[in-house]
């Protein structure tokens, strides 16, 4: 983390920047820093490289659409205390740091990340823990940020210990991009310090096969060996990973390293990301290809997190062609039609149920 590249002159000593990248680094919003670990920079190819495009701002990042939002998921409206967001009855999101090894240009929380001055302190954490004690409906806490692994092992362990002391909290989820951006952070000491607080699920965020290095593989293997359940949440990004072959290659590698592809997200409408966003139709097309050609184990849910705080909706390609009297006609991934017949007694029971329905 101390060796992160954060200044234009440092970056230019390592990478030959395009005019667009130079304009992006210089002109980017002061609230959204630029930073990348030397490891992540070592994966960069030319300006079109899918890793480089996630990390280096370009001129297009300066474009703001009138439909862009500062806080697309309305997380701040759902914050009963400063560092906790509570939108669903059984889950809460805890922001423990605003630092990250790499500031991903598509980040939904770009309003917060990189602002070291806004880093939560002990009193904010105490208020959040107190809220969890007072709200027993919350069973699942997502430890997020920023990237929580930017904190020291002892600080993270202390947070997990305080969360585990809340009787109603059953599951901890650690949301981190460190396996991708700084895989050396996943040390034996780290996993030993945290495994005593299991069950801990780790949500990570690989977006492209070029991020699938031996170092990243070691990080995932180490987490899985220590009993963490690891899942991947990719974000669909235009020209970076918005094609089925790339998604399949990525997900195959993830499965080999015991990381389950969990979500494929539509990129949130946050300012400066229009050039990275792809169409929802494209996401459905990719999912359709995956459904026919790839094991179900490697097929993520395709989700749109509704702007304004409506929560996630998952989308699936429409495979139902028609339905009449228990006769369902479906289309497979090649466009062929197949019929499923319900037993007559099920059809009759459904009819009676709908007649009895007072609505
Ligand atoms: S690691 Fe996560 S929180 Fe940090 S910049 Fe990337 S997407 Fe945002």
Image (cartoon, helix red, strand yellow):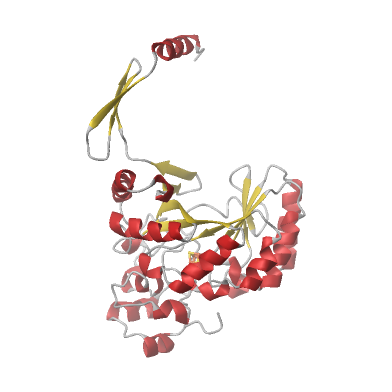
Expressed as whole percent of the image width and height from the top left, the position of residue 81 reads 68, 55
Question: Residue 277 falls in which quadrant of the image?
Answer: bottom left
Q: Residue sitting at 59 percent across and 46 percent down?
A: 87
Q: Residue sitting at 44 percent across and 76 percent down?
A: 40
Residue 49 visible to an observer of this rendering: yes
Residue 145 visible to an observer of this rendering: no
* Rendered-image quadrant of the N terminus: bottom right
Q: Residue sitting at 70 percent across and 49 percent down?
A: 169
Question: How many badges with numbers are in the image?
Answer: 0
Q: Give the vertical position of 73 relative to 320 (above or below).
A: below
Expressed as whole percent of the image width and height from the top left, the position of residue 117 reads 62, 74
Q: Give the vertical position of 108 relative to 262 (above or below).
A: below
Q: Is residue 101 left or right of residue 291?
A: right
Question: Residue 10 falls in which quadrant of the image?
Answer: bottom left
- The foreground one among 62 and 333 is 333
Expressed as whole percent of the image width and height from the top left, the position of residue 75 reads 55, 53
Expressed as whole percent of the image width and height from the top left, the position of residue 31 reads 49, 71
Q: Residue sitting at 45 percent across and 43 percent down?
A: 313
Q: Give the vertical position of 31 relative to 226 (above or below).
A: below
- The foreground one among 85 and 143 is 143
Question: Residue 214 falls in which quadrant of the image?
Answer: bottom left
């Amino acid at each position: 983390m101390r060796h992160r590249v954060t200044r234009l002159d440092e970056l230019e000593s390592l990478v030959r920047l395009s005019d667009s990248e130079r304009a992006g680094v210089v002109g980017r919003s002061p609230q959204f820093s630029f930073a990348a670990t030397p490891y992540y920079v070592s994966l960069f190819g030319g300006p079109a490289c899918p890793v480089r495009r996630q990390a280096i701002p370009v001129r297009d990042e300066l474009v703001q659409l009138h439909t862009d939002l500062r806080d697309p998921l309305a997380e701040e409206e759902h914050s009963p205390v400063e560092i906790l967001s509570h939108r669903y009855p059984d889950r809460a999101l805890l922001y423990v740091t605003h630092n990250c090894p790499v500031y991903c240009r598509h980040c939904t929380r770009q309003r917060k990340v990189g602002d070291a001055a806004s880093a939560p302190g002990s009193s904010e954490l105490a208020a959040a823990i107190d809220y969890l004690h007072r709200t027993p409906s919350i069973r699942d806490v997502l430890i997020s940020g920023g990237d929580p692994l930017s904190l020291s092992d002892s600080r993270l362990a202390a947070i997990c210990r305080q969360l585990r002391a809340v009787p109603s909290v059953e599951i901890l989820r650690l949301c981190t991009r460190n396996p991708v951006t700084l895989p050396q952070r996943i040390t034996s000491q780290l996993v030993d310090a945290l495994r005593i607080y299991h069950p801990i699920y780790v949500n990570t965020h690989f977006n492209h096969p070029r991020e699938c290095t031996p170092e990243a593989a070691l990080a995932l293997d180490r987490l899985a060996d220590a009993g963490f359940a690891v899942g991947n949440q990719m974000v669909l990004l235009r020209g970076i990973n918005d094609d089925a072959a790339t998604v399949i290659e990525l997900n195959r590698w993830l499965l080999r390293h015991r990381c389950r592809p969990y979500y494929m997200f539509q990129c949130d409408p946050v300012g400066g990301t229009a050039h990275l966003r792809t169409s929802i139709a494209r996401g459905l097309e990719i999912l359709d290809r995956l459904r026919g050609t790839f094991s179900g184990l490697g097929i993520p849910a395709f989700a749109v997190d509704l702007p304004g705080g409506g929560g996630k909706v998952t989308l699936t390609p429409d495979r139902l062609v028609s339905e009449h009297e228990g006769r369902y006609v479906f289309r497979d991934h090649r466009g062929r039609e197949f019929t499923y017949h319900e037993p007559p007694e099920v059809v009759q029971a459904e009819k009676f149920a709908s007649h009895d329905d007072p609505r």
